[in-house]
Structures are given as structure tokens and as C-alpha cells.
Amino acid sequence: MSGILVAILTHNRLHDTLACLESVRRLEGPVETIVVLDSGSTDGTPEAVRRLFPEIQVRELGANWGYAAGNNLALRMALEQGMRGVFLLNHDTLVDSRCLVAMLETARSAPQVGAVGPLVWAWPPSQGIWALGGEIHWRRAYTIHRDAGQVEPSQRSPHPVDFVPGCGILLLREALETVGGFDERYFMYWEETDWCQRARRAGFSIWVDPRAQMWHKAPLSSDDLPPATLYYMTRNRLLFFWEHSPSLGRWLALAHAVHGAVRLARQLEQMERPSHAQAVWEGLHDFFHQRWGAWGDGKEERWPASSG
């Protein structure tokens, strides 16, 4: 079986994408193919990548497909080409040269591994850790990024977690063949949590390896999230817990999620952030009306096709 396909999904983030590729170019390990999936950028990203990184493939999607559909293309490419796995990266990330090697060591040594994630530092590094994997809290219907904001990881050795954030995740072939790709109803955010939960139910384990390191240029605080992110976070949180909560706890989880969204919307209104509050209300509305995929009226085009 062949090596690893590294895929970077991007949308109108030229300089971040080029910086990411410069770090990916130095990755050690069995990197077979590197591909940039461009989601309809208008800032010259495809042309710049072809000029500066001629060895890297560029696939132009023509529009913003979102994280789920865009990365599903990379998953299909990897399976068709006989790859051992796919390392998915957001365009606003930087990877340590040993990141992939460490994750593959964990994939070989741990039982029935479906996915492995690295220790993710915030950028700039002075902010500390962005995530060391994630935890799902079923009863109160929320998730956390473990160790977020801490200056040192709580664990130094590889260990299982509930999910790995989608900004950097290695998916293994056997799990992909069993579980399939991302659920495109999510468009972006929560789709990697959904995938990890489906993989765990199929008998695969999800691991994080603190020896593998990367950096993510994303806010640590929810106060900095734009309206589109709030919309997807609201709607997709409800979808995830409705689909995956244990049957006896489903309604309780849904009630907690709805209560949290209503409280957030009212707080945003009090803070005189009407567009942010409206995004939360629309997320609630669209969940109950089963409206999935991209947020209506092209609003998602203003935001990068990234996740977690």
C-alpha cells in the first residue's frame, strides 16, 4: 500500500496557504502526494501555488464547497490512488517536520486506529495550546478542546480521545473504507466530531499524539467568532447531539443545546451585535427546519472553508 496524501483546503487565504505549504514541504515521512483544494478563491491562490510550488497538485473546485465536501474529494482521491491515509490540514496551519512521522508511529502501535491528531498550538505560540484532542460531554451537549490555553500539555504520551479537531487530522484507510467520508450536511464545523464518533462506533479508536505538533491561526475565544461560524456551530451542534446522543438522553441533550443557543443569542443582542445574534437564531431555525449544507444567500462565502 502506498504512502500518505496531504490535502490543504483553502479559500481566499493566499499568504496563509503559502506559509502552510512551506511547512508541509518539509514534512518527513511517506508523503506520496500533496494537493491544494481551492474553494473558489479570487485572490490568486491557485496561480501562486502553481508558480511557487510546482510539485504540488492544485484542484480548483470553482466554489466554496465547505470543509466536508471539499475534503471528501481528497478522501476519494486517496482511496482511488491506494494511499495508506490522508492528512487533512486547514490553510491557516503550520506543521512541524516530524508531525506526520509521530502520528504514523501511533497508528502502527495502538489498536484499530481510525484517526490520529497532533498537539495543536495556538498562533502566535505565546497563547499556549489550542487543542490536545477533544472531549464530548453528552449530558450537557457540548465539547471541549483539551488543554486549550495551557502552556504545557497535560499528557506527553499518545492517548485515545473522543475526537480530533479537523484543522489537522490523519485519517487511516481502513477506517475510511468502513466509515466513509464526512457528512456534507454539516458544510463546516462539527463534521470531524461526527466522523470520529461514527468511527468509534464502528470499532476504531481515535488518538492524539503530543509528540506530533502543529500551529493553528484561529481564535481561542468564542468572543472572536464571526457570524457564519456562530451559525454553523449552533446548527451543527444540535444536529450532532440529536444524531449521536444515547436514546434516553437525546431530548435532554437537545434541550441543553437549545437553551445554550438562546442564551447566547440574547447575550449578543444585549452586546449590540445584531448580525451575530441573528446568525445564532438562524442556526436554531434551520436545524428545526432540517436545512443543511451552506448557509443561505451565499453568506458562507465571506468566511474560510475550514473547521475545528
Image: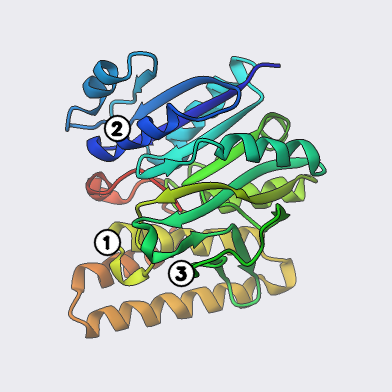
Q: Is residue 236 above or below residue 259?
A: above
Relative to 294, 202 lies left or right: right
Q: Amino acid at mark 1?
A: Pro
Q: Earlier in the sequence, mark 2 or mark 1?
A: 2
- Tell me whether circle 3 and circle 2 mark residues in contact (CB < 8 Å): no
Work out whether 131 lies above or below 192: below
In this rendered view, identify the residue nearer to me: 83 or 289: 83
Q: Can residue 293 be seen by looking at this rendering?
A: yes
**Which numbered tag is attached to residue 226?**
1
Which secondary structure, mark 1? loop
Q: CA distance from mark 1 to mark 3?
A: 20 Å
**Which amino acid does the dot numbered 3 rest on?**
Gly
Task: Estimate the x, y position of residue 34 in percent, counting from the top left.
Answer: 46, 23
Q: Which residue is mark 3?
A: 149
In the rendering, which numbered label is found on residue 18? 2
Q: Residue at x 35, y 44 (%)?
A: 92
- Decide which of tag 1 and tag 3 comes sooner along the chain: 3
Nearer the observer, disc 2 or disc 1?
Answer: 2
Q: Single out the residue that lies furthest toward the bottom.
A: 270
